[in-house]
Amino acid sequence: MEQENKPSPSVSPAEQDAHKAFKALNAAANELIIGQHRWMERLLSALLSNGHLLVEGAPGLAKTTAIKVIADRIEGDFHRIQFTPDLLPADLTGTEIFRPAEGTFEFQQGPIFHNLILADEVNRAPAKVQSALLEAMGEHQVTVGRTTYRLPPLFLVMATQNPIEQEGTYPLPEAQLDRFLMHVSIGYPSAEAEKDILNLARQQARDELGKQASAEVLVTQEQVFLAQKGVLDLFMAPALEDYIVQLVLATREPGSWDPDLSRLVSYGASPRATIALDRCARARAWLDQRDYVSPDDVHAVAHDVLRHRVLLSYEAEADGVTVDQLTDRLLDLVPVP
């Protein structure tokens, strides 16, 4: 496929350093999170796109470890929040404490005010807590009483869901799921990767018996913001922008491409999907150190962007059709520029 190229603008030394820093971060992460290269790419793409990530996978697939590995190597604060049925919104956002000596209330910040947040098992918390988290994600602020507090400029939420043990959970509403940039599904590693994981776990156990060394910070916040700007400045051909729009429109009216698909979809993807496809494709191209976006970038991220945004019909669910299968079909039908 032909991609229209534009003469690449000169890259500043600071942006070159940012590229090197993210390359080193990716390499360090893949040394510790074995067999999950695609998953690590999605996590870095969310960071570069200034978005948030919903991750689903069985227990023990390094979901928690992955964001901790990234957080330890980025300039910023990290906090893990275990969501439970008895969690309150104040446990997340913070609360006002009365100071008798001054006769005033003082706001005590909650864990949501950290830079990198792991919301573990987000579907185990009641709707009020989920709403507080999603306000923080969507508006970049929290409201306590009559006062609104801004969150730090660098703010990333990675929420996890466990696909098993659904009893006693509070599923996220479809409208709230839309606020996540991507919904990433993690599978089991290969036999070869699992053997490497075994060796790595043994080595880490030995290291824990000795002197602990803190991880080196590889990426500063300034480099993160510079990289985010670089992602937005990447060249995308107008034909490719039209292609992204046509892909999202096809999820709303799939019957215009194939009459058999019209019975499969209840609701298509919202305009947020168009924005997310654009951002994630740009982030992938930037990580690949290219100064333009290609159709391959769009194809690579399409499933993770659309997976939680397309609502299938009961008929599709009865037939065992998944959103990923629908996305595959639409990628085949919509012509590539």
Image (tube, rainbow, N blue to C red):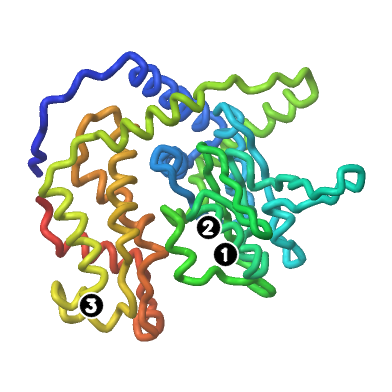
Occupied quadrant, residue 167: bottom right
Is tag 1's residue or tag 3's residue first in the polypeptide sequence? 1
Instruction: Calculate the distance from the C-alpha at mark 1 to the C-alpha at mark 3.
Output: 27 Å
Residue depicted at 35% across the width and 69% down the height: 310
Task: Locate residue 201, reporting x and y percent.
Answer: 66, 34
Q: Nearer the viewer, residue 314 or 196?
A: 314
Occupied quadrant, residue 256: bottom left
Q: Can you identify the residue that label 2 sits on? A: 56
Check disc 2 and give the amino acid type.
Answer: Glu
In what element is the residue under mark 2?
strand
Residue depicted at 21% across the width and 67% down the height: 249
Q: Is residue 109 above or below residue 26?
A: below
Is tag 3's residue or tag 2's residue first in the polypeptide sequence? 2
Task: Locate residue 187, reporting x and y percent.
Answer: 49, 53
Check disc 3 and give the amino acid type.
Answer: Leu
Q: Nearer the viewer, residue 264 or 96?
A: 96
Instruction: Calculate the distance from the C-alpha at mark 3 to the C-alpha at mark 2.
Output: 26 Å
Check disc 1 and give the amino acid type.
Answer: Pro
- 67 displayed left or right of 287: right
In what element is the residue under mark 1?
loop
Q: Can you identify the residue that label 1 sits on? A: 163
- 87 displayed left or right of 158: right
Q: Can you identify the residue that label 3 sits on? A: 261
The numbered dot on residue 55 is none
In what element is the residue under mark 3?
helix
Instruction: Name the outermost residue toward the top.
Output: 13
Instruction: Calculate the distance from the C-alpha at mark 2 to the C-alpha at mark 1.
Output: 7 Å
Q: Dot 2, how many residues are within 10 Å of its Cα: few (below 14), some (14-19), or many (20+)?
A: some
Residue depicted at 67% across the width and 53% down the height: 93
Instruction: Name the outermost residue toward the front.
Output: 103
Is tag 2's residue or tag 1's residue first in the polypeptide sequence? 2
Q: Is residue 3 above or below residue 242?
A: above
